[in-house]
Amino acid sequence: MRKARLLLMILVAFVTMLSTSAGSLAAPALLYVKAEAAALIDVQSGRIIYSKAGDKRMRIASLTKIMTAIVAIERGKLSDVVQVSKNAAGKEGSSIYLKQGEEMSLHNMLYGLMLRSGNDAATAIAEHVGGSLEGFVFMMNETARMIGMTGSEFKNPSGLDEEGHYATANDMAKLTAYALSNPAFQDIVKTKIKTAPNPNDPWDYKWTNKNKMLTFYPGADGVKTGYTKLALRCLVSSATRNGQQLAVVTLNDSDDWADHTRMLDYGFNNYPLTEIVRKGDRLEGMPIAAGKTFRYPLNKDEQGAVRKDAKLLQSSSSTGYVFGERGSLEVYVNNQLVGSVPLYEENSPRLKLTDNEAFKYKDYGLEFRSVRGNWPAALQSAFIRLLSPAGR
């Protein structure tokens, strides 16, 4: 009996060893995460590299304020003066201790929102930018739909527990990548300490960021902590290494600092951002060149699974042809479309423009798709409408 058990243990160990060896050749090592739900995203491409229960709808506590901040930045003016209402000053939970009638620039208030998670700041910002809490919440949900957050619903700007207020880890990863593309948002969430004028006392406000990742993880540059008694510990962090920015989301995670360290290391070590197309690259045998550089995170096994297909326009089928546009170059990984870049005549002035300058031209849609090639069509079309001459 003992011999049979010993032989069984040896057999199990041997099979496990073979499985582990085979798995290490086929894909990156397995990642252990204690969080109930988690997601890891490459910010530039929007690729979700890792997900655990990523589509599970959960409470997100003050991670909500990521949406509050980006909506305020996009819909408001940072130089605006925000006046604190009675409702805002009396908001329960974490606070930056604003007083009724107090005035502060929207820019400074956003620091109080993101560094100290002020629920009073969230309420004051929402009332100012949205005209009312209800108006601002409408903007939040409108933005969520635009980004493609299909499993999320917002009921308030602070993240206080409320029935029907929830999001998924994958959705929060999408939101974070979207928000980090905004320079003002980037500057706020990577700030460790911020001072601001204080009209109530002879000394300035001084806010220290609650996000400990900024202190102990090399290259950390965001984003937001969160906690309520029902949501428990929630965290979004980001870091940049070798020109690649990753963001991590964990929901209900009692070991979040360690989990975020492991997940960021996992992403940087196994999915480096790889240049697939370089701006100016010429199609073989044709006077046509790529209008943008395209980079995408790939593991070792995917390096040889990249395919590029040119989709050329017919001169009679597109007004874009008049402006030097000749089509697009679609990029596939394992036969899955992950993005595309515009194609132009080799002598087109478009190839000499920076990416920001290229946004001024009429083919906004193609330019945007080359940056967020695998993002939802709704987001692309929204930007086309916003940036096109008819939409301004």
Image: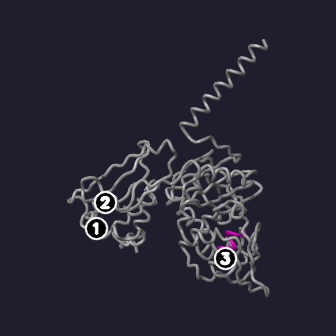
Which residue is at the front of the view, 246 or 54?
A: 246
Q: Secondary structure at mark 1?
A: loop
- The residue positioned 64% from the left and 68% from the top of the image is 190
Display colour scheme: one colour
- The CA span between labels 1 and 3 is 45 Å
The three-letter amino acid code for the residue at tag 1 is Ser
Of residues 309 and 156, the one drawn nearer to the viewer in this rendering? 309
Marks 2 and 3 close (CB-CB < 8 Å): no
Left or right for 339, reference 189: left
Could you tell me what secondary structure mostly forms the magenta stretch?
A: helix
- Looking at the rendering, in which quadrant would you find the N terminus? top right
Residue holding disc 1: 348
Badge 2 density bin: few <14, some 14–19, many ≥20, Cα 10 Å: many
User: Which comes before the other along the chain, label 1 or label 3?
Assistant: 3
Q: Which residues are magenta?
A: 110-116
Question: Residue at 71% of width from left, 18% of height from top?
Answer: 8
> Which numbered circle lies on residue 109?
3
Estimate the x, y position of residue 127 in percent, counting from the top left. Answer: 63, 74
Query: Given this view, does label 1 or label 3 mark the residue nearer the observer?
Result: 1
Q: Is residue 26 above or below residue 35?
A: above
Q: CA distance from mark 2 to mark 3?
A: 46 Å
Residue sticking out furthest to the left: 316
Relative placement, left or right, of 77 versus 36 is left
